[in-house]
Amino acid sequence: MKVLIPTPLRSYTAAHEVDANGATVGEVLADLDRRYPGFRFRMVDEQDKIRRHMRLFVNGEQSFDLAQPLRASDSIQIVQALSGG
Amino acid sequence: MARAMKKAVAKKVKPAAKAVKKANGKARAAKSPKVALLVSTRKGAWIFHGDSNRKNWSADGPHFLGQIINHLMLDPRDGKTLIAAASTGHLGPTIFRSTNMGKSWTEAKRPPAFAKAEDPSKGRTVKHTFWLTPAHANEPNVWYAGTSPQGLFRSEDGGMNWEPFGLVNDDPQYRAWMGSEQDGTPDGPKMHSITIDPRDPKHMYMGMSGGGVHESLDAGRTWSPMVKGMEVVGGFDAKNIAFHDPHCLRICPSNPDRLYQQNHCGIYRIDRPSDEWVRIGRAMPKKVGDIGFVMTVHPRDDKTVWVLPMDGQTVWPRTSPEGRPSVYGTKNGGKTWTRLDNGLPEAQAWWTVKRQAMTADSRDPVGLYFGTTSGELWMSRDEGARWTNFARHLPEIYAVEAAEVM
């Protein structure tokens, strides 16, 4: 499936959109981490929570659940909730 | 005949010896290390390379523009490996390593992270790595890291993979002393000043803001508090370890039995095996006080240290007292202090200098360096007698480290 990548994470992917596989949100992030080592920890913490200033949408609906099931036709958007100066 | 031979040999040897001496001198001059300043800021890192006289400086950077760099350290055991503690306002924390003085960087495979809790709501999350310490000279590639919230981590592969010290990070007593995220400094409680005894890799000290000074005799597996003699904010009980807030702890390279400390409440010295700190800041001028963040020790003289006082009155502005910044130095272990402000602004300079933002090189005379939160770098080539500004307009400076590079 297609995953939209925000600018802070493009140093890993070198692309604004990449392909990834997985039956859940967590599996897709694990796949991205295999392809782009270090990617996952910068948006998901060690307690498996999506970090405070990162947001993940599935088909336009916000998701905080790494166990959320996905279909191959789904699309994922990762965005940063930038704040402060 | 023998006399003639001796004379001939002497004649032959003399020019050769001279040539060798001259060649050695050239080699020494060519190979003498130069000082590089590793500057960590809220928006990236810079490396300032000094010439052999430490007069002219060239800026290499920014590295990691826009990323929060809390600490950048050179490995003194190989003189070429840099380790940087990085995060951003939105991405999680990580560690970068360079083995070519910053020409290229590699990200850690496993940055410092707490163990995953069975109940995720009770698990802790590293917000940033605050402090980096290369381990003992006999332990190449070993590093320690202190984080916010407070945790101790160790890498045995030059900073690529970091393991948590569960025995302190998850110890109920230590967790109580560390406090919650609301008990620390404005951007979180910090483990810092991880200090290795140069005589014994297993003998360590560290500071917790808040939570006191602690000592380990078994390479960080177990720790015990070392706060006797340290004071706390008026009205609080000094027997409660959680109330102690050491800001910066330094061991004397020339005498590892002597340590100095700049605390939230005073300047201290301890001479081991004594377990009692002495508040040597009492000898500072009353109108300046002995509050601050930095502590800088002389590389060869255990009686000489420098501090940079901050205003600790009323609401604790922690800016230069009366807007007149000055370094204060002692040459007698804290019995007396001398104001060292020649060249610094005389008025309306409301600087804050954070705990990692002052350092010394190992030259003779010692070079001193500090960076302000307003982005200025200042230095003295003569142990504080005269100060000059050599960089301005940098982002908020968090740390300044002097490294000797070939």
Image (cartoon, coloured by chain):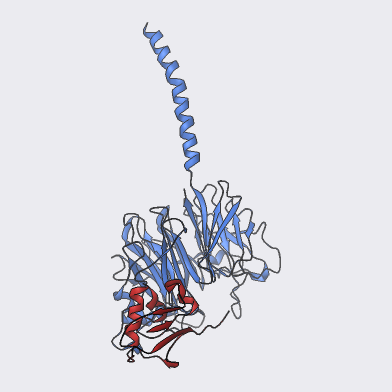
Chain colours: A red, B blue
Would residue A60 be found to the left or right of residue B43 on screen?
Answer: left
Would residue B241 be found to the left or right of residue B218 on screen?
Answer: right
* Residue at the right extreme of this rendering: B347
The residue sitting at 38% across, 78% down in the picture is A40
Label count reads 0
Would residue B391 be found to the left or right of residue B1 on screen?
Answer: right
The residue sitting at 42% across, 66% down in the picture is B96
Front in this rendered view, residue A5 or B214: A5
Name the spot of residue B324 as percent of width and height, x first.
67, 66
Front in this rendered view, residue B120 or B137: B120
Tell me if residue B360 comes above or below residue B204 in the rendering. above
For residue B97, say whether it is visible. yes
Please identify the quadrant where the C terminus of chain A is shown.
bottom right
Tell me if residue B26 comes above or below residue A62 in the rendering. above
Name the spot of residue B276 as percent of width and height, x first.
41, 67
The residue sitting at 47% across, 39% down in the picture is B28
Front in this rendered view, residue B101 or B396: B101
Name the spot of residue B377 as percent of width and height, x first.
60, 61
Name the spot of residue B248 as percent of width and height, x first.
47, 67
Please identify the quadrant where the N terminus of chain A is shown.
bottom left
Picture quadrant where residue B171 is located:
bottom left
Tell me if residue A69 comes above or below residue B359 in the rendering. below
For residue B239, say whether it is visible. no
